[in-house]
Image (cartoon, rainbow, N blue to C red):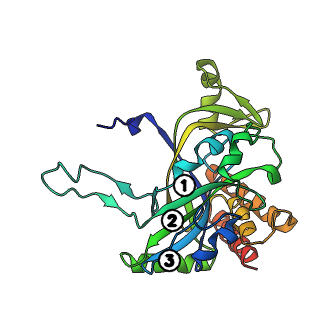
Amino acid sequence: MQAFMSPEKYMKSRVTAKVVIDNQPSQLATDVANRTVAAFGYPKKNEDLAYLKFVLASEMENYNSDYLPRSEIVANFGTARNKPFDIEHVIEEEGSYITDKEFNQTKNTIIGHIVDSAVAQKDGTVLAEESLATFDDKDDPSRPYEDQIDIVGTGVLYKFLFPQTVADIIDLADKGEMSVSMEVWFLGYDYLVGTEIVPYSETTAAQYQPMFENREEVDGRPVSRVLRNVIFGGVAATDNPADPEAQILETAASKKELAGDSKFRSLVARHNELHELYVLKPSRKIETEHLKITKAIASMRRS
């Protein structure tokens, strides 16, 4: 019998990115990066499936103030493969389907799964797995944006089983309004103070954990967590993007270079600022501006 580690030992975080419906799965490798369909995509198109591509995670700090370091991306990007695609992370097991005498009322919105995942550069180039053995995987929170990496993925939705839900996802994705939230399990973490990684210990935890939880700063430097020993557990569809930085790789994969566009970067920066302001003091004014900026970003991505 195969032994397995209890999930209770893991902590959990989430990152958010954009999703795009892929109407030509045979061209997926060309669109996302330079890999063959056999290595990155689908061996054959099935009419009962809807095909999509997305950015799963990025070498950056997410809206939960969790920093995903390069070493974890390089070491564990493959754990995203064959994981579920659901709606808003609604997956809750109340009991075993096998041993419970009565059929349990499990909440389960799984409507597809991730097919493949890979490491990509910001220009959309996917790195061959064999090249990662010599790739610079040093953690550097001050690394320039254009030198950072992402995890990109492909997936399928069960179109015949969930026609109405999949149709809604396709509609929102075509409008640039659909995102995916990647679930990340992790066993431990260090602290990130500004751009300095501080190893976790009882001493550093006593100093920085309260500051992290209360979103306090050290001499103007924010305190975040650096996730360690991660497993990527699946993605959930969401219509409220919290991390538009991940959109940039997706548009680069579609041969759209927005990384150097000052207006686009300004919108992204303001989007992130609004999330921070909303945490401190929610208001309808912030919600209205957030919606306006989100639509502007989506419009630039489609143009």
- Classify 10 Å Cα crowding around label 2: few (below 14), some (14-19), many (20 and above): many
Contact check, label 3 and label 1, Cβ < 8 Å: no
Residue 21, image x and y in percent?
58, 75
Q: Is residue 154 visible?
A: yes
72, above or below 183, in the image? above
User: Residue at horizontal 45%, vertical 81%?
Assistant: 47
Q: Which residue is mark 2?
A: 237
- Classify 10 Å Cα crowding around label 1: few (below 14), some (14-19), many (20 and above): many
Q: Which mark is residue 182?
A: 1
Front position in the image: 288 or 191: 191
Label 2 or label 1, whichever comes before in sequence order: 1
Label 3 or label 2, whichever comes before in sequence order: 3
Q: The disc labelled 3 sits on which kind of residue? A: Lys
Label 3 or label 1, whichever comes before in sequence order: 3
In which quadrant is the C terminus drawn?
A: bottom right
Q: Which mark is residue 117?
A: none
Q: Which residue is mark 3?
A: 45
In which quadrant is the N terminus drawn?
A: top left
